[in-house]
Image (cartoon, helix red, strand yellow):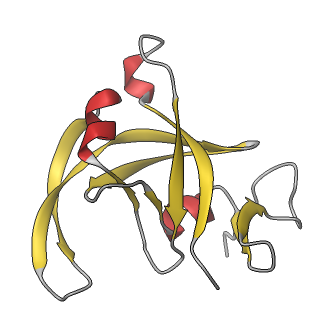
Amino acid sequence: MGIIRTNLHLRNPSSGSTLSSMEVNARVDTGAVHLRIPEHLAIQLDLKELERREVTLGNGHRITVPYVGPVEVSFKNRRCFTGAMVLGDEPLLGSIPMEDMDLVVVPSRQTVDVNPQSPNIPMSMAK
């Protein structure tokens, strides 16, 4: 499977109506956990640093990065509220916001879509 990308809308819900949402093209990584955004998006959305988090990079090095939020993430008829790690040069959609919005990867089309088993409203397990 190749690299999957999708368009999302990101918004700072704390800003009221003073800032509009931004459409971004994000890399999709089901092996990643969190939403990750580059510093320039955090600045444009006026997201506040909530704390610093330690992350382990692909080469094994550990660094601390800003964790900002809240961030409203929208995809088609779904949305969620999450925090984001400020790191890298492109947005990355990880498994937490994907699960929260009940999104699935469609490998045959190399796309992301809403769960076809629950097309109208996100489904979640509460067992």
On the rendered image, what quadrant is the N terminus found in? Answer: bottom right
Q: Residue 92, relative to residue 21: is it above or below?
A: below
Q: Position of residue 95 (x, y in %)?
A: 52, 70
Residue most extreme to the front = 2
Within the image, what quadrant is residue 32 found in? Answer: bottom left
Is 18 left, or right, of 50 in this rendering? right
Is 103 left, or right, of 34 in this rendering? right
Residue at 51% of width from left, 55% of height from top?
26
Q: Position of residue 45 (x, y in %)?
A: 35, 29
Residue at 81% of width from left, 50% of height from top?
121
Residue most extreme to the top = 18
The answer to whether residue 57 shows anywhere in this view is: yes
Residue at 42% of width from left, 11% of height from top?
18
Q: Residue 9, relative to residue 110: is it above or below?
A: above
Within the image, what quadrant is residue 60 found in? Answer: bottom left
Is 7 left, or right, of 120 in this rendering? left
On the rendered image, what quadrant is the C terminus found in? Answer: bottom right
Q: Position of residue 46 (x, y in %)?
A: 29, 27
Q: Position of residue 109 (x, y in %)?
A: 79, 72
The answer to whether residue 124 shows anywhere in this view is: no
Q: Residue 112, relative to residue 25: is it above or below?
A: below
Within the image, what quadrant is residue 85 found in? Answer: bottom left
Residue at 61% of width from left, 48% of height from top?
7
Marks counted in the figure total: 0
Is 99 left, or right, of 49 in this rendering? right
